[in-house]
Image (cartoon, helix red, strand yellow):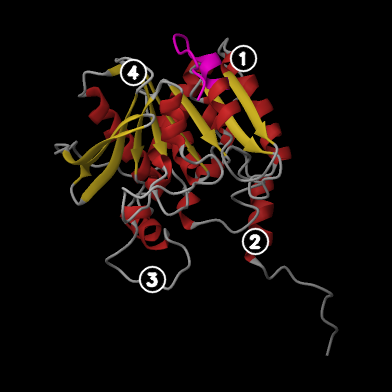
Amino acid sequence: MPAEPASFDFSPSVNHRLLMEHTPRTMAFDGADPAAWRRRLRAKVAELLGRRPAERTALNVRSLWRREAAQGTIEKIVFTAERGADVPAFVCLPAKARPPYTWAICVQGHSTGMHNSIAVDREDNSVPIDVPGDRAYALTAMESGLAALCIEQRSFGERREQVQETKSPSQCQVAACQALMLGRTLIGERVWDVDRGIDYLLGRDDVRADRIGVMGNSGGGTTSLFAAATLDRLAWAMPSCYFCTFAASIMSIRHCECNYVPGLLTCAEMADILGTFAPRPVVVVAGQKDDIFPIGATRQAFDELQCIYAAFGAADRCRLVVGPEGHRFYAAPAWQALFELIDGVTPRPA
């Protein structure tokens, strides 16, 4: 019997890594006609995110409660994003500013939910809690004079799967896989909810339509980035602890099923996708010790992003904020960087 070779490439990831290295990115930024490139890639990303609802159903906004907090007024509402998809949200109005407000649409990542954005218990919103990692986004936004709309993302918090049982440790597996079978992606569905959140805000009389932005950490950073790449009505974006290269992050270790978009890496890398937001202001937030989205690859991707922004004459409209720790938000330097990029917003001390 002949001797067997010393090793075989049995693992599928060996093949996938070779494909990743040698498959050309057909829509990567090449410097030629930036406006036309942006238009093509934005349309392609929107296509890859999957089928959108055929119509915008009535929002049917319902108010659940309203109360005063040290930072301002907080109201809990529910609106309908599409048939069978109701969205709980907190509407947070700052005490330190007058309307019309600059608004931040805040999206939490893989956590117990949007309740962290205002530092209250998920089951009893009247009970305060401590939130680590500066993830009480809405409170710091309000303290700085911004209003916030905190959306519960699909599969998180109050929108966690409660109908179909799953043995998977991933809270997103059922929704992500079902979405794929329906020609959708969970990222695309979450971006749709942000889009409907913008619809809600534009129906209010205290909103500066040209000052609506989106921000979030980790899984919230994912939604923030893809919302920026596909939603024309957003004026600024602040994705945290997500921006990197796909090669060094999503494709290098196990990630939740909700992170994957079929065919995306054959078209572009992450810097290209966020680059389609140019020339609008963007603040990228990262952690020096983040082992999920390595800082070296994040800096590499940011260099590429700056080149894209420079091609649009807006090199000074994208910033990188690096905190000294790991996978978390860094409120003080992140908000300060955003304030420096947005005209007419004056930071106020907390």
Q: Is residue 220 above or below residue 302?
A: below
Q: In the figure, 18 relative to 134: above or below?
A: below
Residue closest to the eye, 325 or 254: 325
Circle nearer the viewer, 4 or 2: 4
In space, the residues marked 3 and 2 are separated at their CA atoms by: 25 Å
Which-is-in-front pick, marks 4 and 1?
4
The residue to which callout 1 is attached is 315
Q: Earlier in the sequence, mark 3 or mark 2?
A: 2
Front-lying residue, 7 or 309: 309
Mark 2 or mark 1, which has the lower sequence index?
Answer: 2
For disc 2, the marked residue is 13
Residue 78 lies, in percent from the top left, at 22, 43
Q: Nearer the viewer, mark 4 or mark 3?
A: 4
Circle nearer the N terminus (1, 3): 3
Q: How many discs appear?
A: 4
The type of residue carrying mark 1 is: Ala
| Quadrant where the image shows the N terminus | bottom right
Q: Tell me the residue that label 4 is attached to.
A: 101
Q: Secondary structure at mark 2?
A: helix
Sort mark 3 into few (<14), some (14-19) or many (20+) by Cα contacts within 10 Å: few
Using the rendered view, name the quadrant where residue 65 is placed: top left
* Front of the two marks 3 and 2: 3
Q: CA distance from mark 4 to mark 1?
A: 27 Å
- CB contact under 8 Å: marks 3 and 2: no
**Start and end of the magenta stretch?**
337-350
> Which mark identifies residue 166?
3
